[in-house]
Amino acid sequence: MSSFFSQPFVLALLSGLAIVLIAFIGFGSLAVARRRLARWLSVIVAFAAGSLLGATFFHLLPESIEEGGPTFPLALAGLLLFFLIDSVLWVYHCHGGRCLHNIAHPADAHAHAHATEHRRPKPIGPLNLVGDAIHNLTDGVVIASAFLVDPALGFAAAFATAMHEIPQEVGDFGILVHSGFKPSRALVWNGLVALLVLVGIVVTFLAADVVTGLTQYTIPFAAGVFLYMACTNLLAEIKEEASVRVRLMQVVFLFLGVGLLWATTLVETH
C-alpha cells in the first residue's frame, strides 16, 4: 500500500472533506442575499472554468500521452459519461415541470414548496439523491487521479470541483425541500451523499496499489470530465451575463485560471 497514507492521499482526503462541507452550503445560502451570492459566484466560477481547462490541456492530457494510455478514447468516455449523468439529472430535475435552473436558489424553491405542498409527495427527491451519489463518486475518482499526478494539480482539481459543486448543491437542497424533505433532513441527506466523494478518493488510491498502470486510465478519463464540466457546467453559467463590467471580470478570471495552471508547468520544468 505504497500510495495509501502517502502525502498525496492525505491531501486528496483533506480536499475531499472540504468539498463534503460544501453540501451544507444549501442551508447556509438561505441566509445569503440572492444577488450577493450570484455576484461572487459568477467571477469565481469563471476562474474555476479556466483552472479546469488549464488542468486538462497543460497537465492531464500531456501526462496521459506520456504514459502511453488510450488517452483520447478515455477522455471522450469521461466526457460522454458526465453528459449522460447530467442528462439523467436534468430529466429528474424537470419532473413535473420543475427544472434545475428554476430552483438555483433555495429561497425560491422553499417559497415554491409552501405554495405546492398539497401536491406532495414527489419522487424527484430520492431520484436526485441517486444521481448526485453517482456524480459525487465520480468526482472523488477524478480528484484522486489528479493528486496521483501532482499535488498542485490535485488542489486545482479540488478547487474547480468545489466551485462546480456550490451551485449544484444549492439546487439540490432546493429540490429536496420542494419534494417534501424538511430543511434539516435535506441537509443531512445532502451531507451523506456528499461523503461518496471520499469513497471515490479512497477506492482510487487503493486501486492504484492493486491495478498496475491505473493512472493510464483514470487520468484521461478525468481530462474528459474536466473538459465537460468546464464547457457545459461552468462556462454555461456565465456565458449569458448581461453586465459588460461583470463579463469583463469573468473573462479576466477565466484567463487567470488558465494562466495559473500554465505557470505550474513552467515551475515543474525548472
Image (spheres, rainbow, N blue to C red):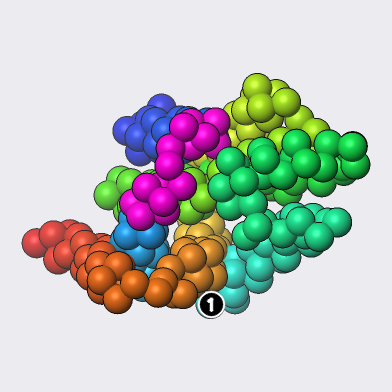
Camera-nearest residue between 143 and 170: 170
Residue 258: give x, y in percent of width and height: 27, 68
Q: Is residue 17 magenta?
A: no
* Most distant residue in the front direction: 115
Left or right of 208 in this view: 243: left
Q: Nearer the viewer, residue 57 or 149?
A: 57
Say left or right for 84 vs 96. left
On the image, the x and y values in percent for residue 163 come to: 42, 50
Residue at the extreme left of the image, as rendered: 270
Q: Which residues are magenta?
A: 26-40
Q: Can see residue 30? A: yes
Q: Residue at x 67, y 40 (%)?
A: 111
- Residue type at numbered disc 1: Phe
Q: Residue at x 62, y 60 (%)?
A: 101
Q: Is residue 98 above or below residue 184?
A: below
Q: Is residue 70 visible?
A: no
Residue 17 image-quadrant placement: top left
SS type, badge 1: helix
**Residue 224: x %, y % from top left:** 53, 68
Residue holding disc 1: 72
Magenta segment's dominant SS is helix
**Position in image of residue 188 (x %, y %):** 65, 24
In the displayed structure image, the side of residue 7 where residue 97 appears, left or right: right
The residue lying toward the viewer, choosing from 173 and 256, is 173
Q: Is residue 26 above or below residue 252?
A: above
**In the picture, which quadrant includes the C terminus?**
bottom left
Q: Residue at x 43, y 42 (%)?
A: 33
Q: Residues within 10 Å of mark 1 (few under 14, many from 20)?
A: some
* Residue located 82% across and 42% down the image: 116
48 to 143, vertically: above or below? below
Q: How many marks?
A: 1
Reply above or below: 189 against 51.
Answer: above
